[in-house]
């Protein structure tokens, strides 16, 4: 997979998706990770609607000041909730500690 390049806004652009490895989009996941709020984003991120670069983000973004609660991980992405009640999938490389360690 190609490396992500920074977009003009400072939010990381997604590398090209591999159609053969594309995951389902428009999916949520249960809160299996018992950690509490307090983990932080390493940079501004898009909250995607599925665990894949090809999944849409509907311009939902979060920044390093947002506190998050990890729910679980799948295909290199963590499903999470921000304290401001936004849900989405974020690439584990953009999360402190590499995201959730609990599989969805």
Image (cartoon, rainbow, N blue to C red):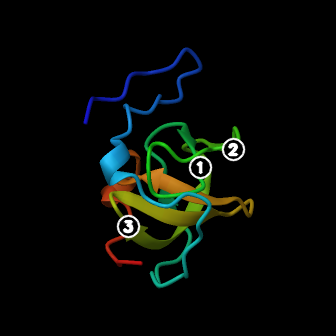
* Residue at numbered disc 1: 47
Q: Is residue 56 left or right of residue 101?
A: right
In space, the residues marked 3 and 1 are separated at their CA atoms by 14 Å
Which quadrant of the structure image shows residue 2? top left
* Mark closest to the chain's N terminus, 3 or 2: 2
Residue at horizontal 44%, vertical 21%? 6
Residue 95 in sight from this viewpoint: yes
In the rendered image of this protein, does residue 11 appear above or below residue 29? above
Q: Is residue 86 left or right of residue 21?
A: right
* Mark closest to the chain's N terminus, 3 or 1: 1
Q: Secondary structure at mark 2?
A: loop
Q: Is residue 66 left or right of residue 95?
A: right
Q: Position of residue 103 (x, y in %)?
A: 35, 77
* Residue at numbered disc 3: 74
Q: Are marks 3 and 1 in contact (CB under 8 Å)?
A: no
Please identify the residue farthest to the front as the structure is shown.
20
Q: Residues within 10 Å of mark 1 (few under 14, many from 20)?
A: many
Please identify the residue farthest to the left as the structure is shown.
1
In the rendered image of this protein, does residue 34 appear above or below residue 55? below
Q: Are marks 2 and 1 in contact (CB under 8 Å)?
A: yes
* Residue at numbered disc 2: 60
Q: Nearer the viewer, mark 3 or mark 2?
A: 3
Where's the N terminus, which quadrant? top left
Q: Nearer the viewer, residue 71 or 18?
A: 18
């Amino acid at each position: 997979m190609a490396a992500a390049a920074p977009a003009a806004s400072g939010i990381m652009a997604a590398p090209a998706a591999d159609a053969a490895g594309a995951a389902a989009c428009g999916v949520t996941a249960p809160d299996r990770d018992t950690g509490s709020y307090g983990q932080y984003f390493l940079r501004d991120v898009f909250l995607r609607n599925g665990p894949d670069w090809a999944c849409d983000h509907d311009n939902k973004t979060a920044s390093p000041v947002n506190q998050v609660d990890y729910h679980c991980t799948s295909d290199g992405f963590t499903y999470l909730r921000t304290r401001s009640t936004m849900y989405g999938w974020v690439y584990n490389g953009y999360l402190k500690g590499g995201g959730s360690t609990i599989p969805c």
